[in-house]
Image (cartoon, rainbow, N blue to C red):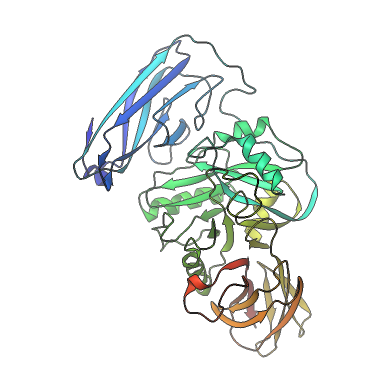
Amino acid sequence: MRFVREDLIDRTYFYLPFNIPEGTKRIEVAYRYSPGDQGDPNIIDIGAFGPGPTGLFNMEHFRGWSGSFRNRFYISQDDSTPGYLRGRVESGIWKVILGLYKISKTGCDCEVEISPLPEFEERQTAGSGHECFSGVASPREIGWSRGDLHVHSVHSDGNNSILELANEARRRGLNYVAITDHNTIAQRCEINEMAAHDLLMFSGQEITTYHGHANVWGNRNCLEFRCQSESDVSLLLGRVHQEGLVFSINHPNDIGPNWEFKALRGFDCLEVWCGLWPRLNFQSLEWWDMLLNEGNRVVGVGGSDLHEIEDSSSTDGYGVGSPTTWIHADVLTSDLLTSSIARGNVFISRDPEGPMLNLEAWSPSNDKHAVMGRELVSRKHEPIFLRLNVRSAEGGFARLVVDGRGSSIARIDSGDFTKVWQLESGANRYCRMEILSKDSDPDSNDKMDQEITALSNPIYIKRV
């Protein structure tokens, strides 16, 4: 097969049908393509559908995806290449799906080899089919739960197994980890088989379109990722909400990949902090403030986007939980954790050690209180008070942000710091808190001079 750059417009996804006869026990697929030119590479992704419809939002027969990370895969009843759903190899017309991510101006030659095998030595594993549902940690009261909402494993382009990621999360003191592999939920089966009582591991999907990425947590079926337009994503968003799940835009900045559907509204969360803070996260933060000022109540979350455990002997620097998303939940289960995210009582810290913060507001006029993610109703001319408590940030700065603008800065002079602010009467929409490192210049106009070490979610203000 030969592809040219114009194919990116006409047929971004190419389907190669092949017949699987009755009695086939295993399918093996390998592919190769020409590399392209220096600075103008070819990148072709690969996946597979079993017999059945393959149109947009027909994902029932989708069997897996490996992007361009692997050049071969197999599927059988009791085993499969990571990223692919093991299960019965049905007879009929299967399809290899090729995603034309990048095609050089000189074109791309691609070959695909498909081998149906009638017999082979099966590796016995727990469970079968693709009706696997992830296990959860034993329900227990938790309060603030710290974890990572964006981690990759060998089931997509990560270099670590689920077990290795679990052990590293335990070592760093996390309560939960979401394994969000690209365009697959094959990791669910493995998570189910090793469900632990001391660490909640649950799966999600990084919906990896060619126009930006988004996370959904807890989906039991693979979600559509072949979205090419805002209307496609809007339909996907509706289906995610029908399942009672939340939709979170990932790393919307120039390092990203950026989110190109910036006019879309109605999503639940925004990954305002991805990886280490200097990775242009200030751009994501600026878009978040723009959305909040429009009146969109979008929850800010963080995630490491980890693809490899780098140094297991260190608790500093980049790793699982860099950054850490703290979620307030009464009980630690995947469903309750996800619903707690949607409520917005969430903050983000540089790592599992903190800083920890809590922000609350109250109105003396009606003695009402609000925590992060909630709304405080107050009379138009009555003041509102905000109380910040932050730990493990001594020497840094606390910056109060009201309607997207920094309104007050305080030096944090103790390891357990508390300060109260008063918001005067006005038409404020929301307030949130930023904690800056001690090496930051809080007065600088250069965002790269300001390293954020913790972020609160907003408290919304309604004047009546």
Name the foreground residue: 193 vs 107: 107
Please say whether residue 290 is visible from this viewpoint: no
Image position, residue 435 (x, y; %): 63, 71
Image position, residue 89 (x, y; %): 48, 19
79 vs 183: above or below: above
455 vs 162: above or below: below
Q: Residue furthest right?
A: 141
Name the foreground residue: 164 vs 193: 164
Work out which quarter of the rendered image holds the N terminus and state it. top left
118 vs 157: above or below: above
Work out which quarter of the rendered image holds the C terminus and state it. bottom right
Image position, residue 114 (x, y; %): 36, 20
In which image quadrant can residue 262 be found? bottom left
Residue at horizontal 52 percent and vertical 35 percent from the top: 155
In which image quadrant can residue 166 be found? top right
Left or right of 224? Residue 16 is left
Residue at horizontal 61 percent and vertical 48 percent from the top: 320
Q: Residue furthest front?
A: 313
Left or right of 181? Residue 264 is left
Image position, residue 293 (x, y; %): 52, 75
Count of labels shown? 0
Residue at horizontal 79 percent and vertical 80 percent from the top: 367
Name the foreground residue: 182 vs 173: 173
Residue at horizontal 48 percent and vertical 9 percent from the top: 119
Please say whether residue 152 is visible from this viewpoint: yes
